[in-house]
Image (cartoon, rainbow, N blue to C red):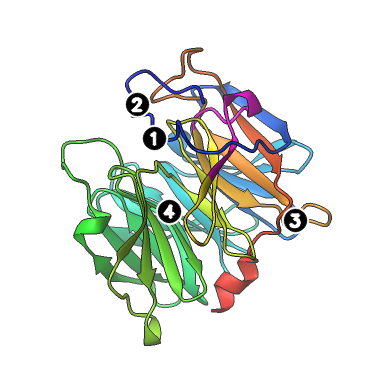
């Protein structure tokens, strides 16, 4: 694996089984594609972080603008009715949760002046979502019906080890069964949090250490597929914690930020990867265009519809 100078070689002894890869779309250098959600017809909706944009991408790579805000956007997920819920912040740099309807109109669901850096978001119940706060070291509960927000969990394992570091702590967030998984990128941890009766948070525990994970997705067997961002790769982590590298720079995943399984017909064993081309820690080749890459992983993704009805 080719790594940026100065990074700890945490994957040097990790097995490598590269998946077939195809670049389906390319964006200009210094485009920060942050996250994605995929519709049942296979359309990708991708957050273009720094310009506050959501782009719509067909499986064949046709790109159009779906929505635009006056701030920045990070996490993205579907609501049960097919709209999109986003995290980010507004033009005044205040954290917000946004609802983007399928016609592209944008509504502010909630403004969170006490949040520091809203990032990944995932459903915990119909119209209720959990959003990671990367700098506060917390997870927020967002209710789309009432437009109320509250702290679901605040814990040292979700926080940065040093408040001065720019690296995000709680970052990617997904539910699998009765467990919430959260990546703490700054501490290089993958965490498990039990979801208790009534949807309350249990005590977090460390699942995998010494791993640099941004966002991730699950297959139906419980294996987790993760973007490593500054390590320019994609991982597969089994339910027992074994890690394999399935994509590297040669597959085009430079600055990988998030992954999601395809949902269209004939596309359910495809893993889509978005990235920023290495904007914040370039590889030796320098910052590259931001790609959307399709990996054929041979496994089927955990259905998004399950998340919305749990």
Tell me if 104 is positioned left or right of 265 in this view. left
Q: Are marks 1 and 2 in contact (CB under 8 Å)?
A: yes
The one nearer the camera, 243 or 254, is: 243
Mark nearer the viewer, 1 or 2: 1
User: How busy is the neighbourhood of tag 4: few (under 14 within 10 Å), some, or many (20 plus)?
Assistant: many
Q: Which residues are magenta?
A: 244-255
Mark nearer the viewer, 3 or 4: 3
Tell me if 294 is positioned left or right of 202 in this view. right
Q: Quarter of the image holding residue 222?
A: bottom right
**In the rendered image, the vertical position of residue 298 relative to residue 126, given as above or below:** above
Mark nearer the viewer, 4 or 2: 2
Mark nearer the viewer, 2 or 3: 2
Q: Secondary structure at mark 1?
A: loop
Determine if residue 281 is in view: yes
- The residue at which mark 2 appears reads as 7
Mark nearer the viewer, 3 or 1: 1
Q: Quadrant of the C terminus?
A: bottom right
- The residue at which mark 1 appears reads as 10
Tag of residue 268: 3
């Amino acid at each position: 694996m080719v790594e940026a100078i100065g990074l700890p070689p945490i994957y040097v002894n990790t097995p490598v089984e590269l998946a077939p890869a195809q670049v389906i779309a390319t964006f200009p250098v210094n485009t920060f594609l942050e996250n994605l959600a995929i519709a049942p017809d296979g359309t990708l909706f991708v957050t273009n972080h720094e310009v506050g944009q959501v782009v719509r991408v067909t499986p064949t790579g046709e790109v159009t603008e779906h929505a635009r805000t006056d701030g920045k956007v990070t996490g993205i997920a579907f609501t049960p009715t097919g709209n999109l819920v986003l995290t980010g912040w507004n033009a005044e740099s205040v954290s917000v949760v946004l609802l983007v309807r399928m016609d592209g109109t944008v509504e502010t669901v909630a403004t969170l002046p006490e949040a520091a850096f809203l990032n990944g978001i995932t459903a915990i119940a119909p119209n209720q979502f959990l959003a990671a706060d990367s700098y506060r070291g917390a997870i927020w509960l967002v209710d789309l019906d009432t437009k109320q927000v509250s702290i679901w969990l605040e814990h040292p394992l979700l926080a940065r080890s040093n408040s001065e570091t720019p690296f995000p702590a709680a970052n990617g967030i997904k539910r699998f069964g009765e467990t919430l998984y959260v990546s703490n990128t700054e501490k290089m941890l993958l965490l498990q949090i039990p979801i208790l009766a009534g949807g309350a948070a249990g005590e977090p525990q460390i699942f995998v250490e010494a791993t640099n994970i941004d966002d991730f997705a699950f297959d139906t067997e419980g294996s987790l597929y993760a973007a490593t961002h500054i390590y320019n790769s994609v991982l597969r982590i089994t339910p027992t914690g074994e890690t394999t590298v399935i994509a590297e720079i040669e597959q085009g995943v430079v600055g990988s930020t998030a992954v999601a399984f395809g949902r269209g017909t004939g596309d359910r064993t495809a893993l889509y990867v978005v990235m920023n081309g290495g904007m914040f820690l370039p590889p030796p080749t320098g910052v590259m265009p931001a790609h959307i890459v399709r990996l054929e992983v041979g496994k089927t993704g955990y259905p998004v519809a399950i998340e919305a009805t749990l």
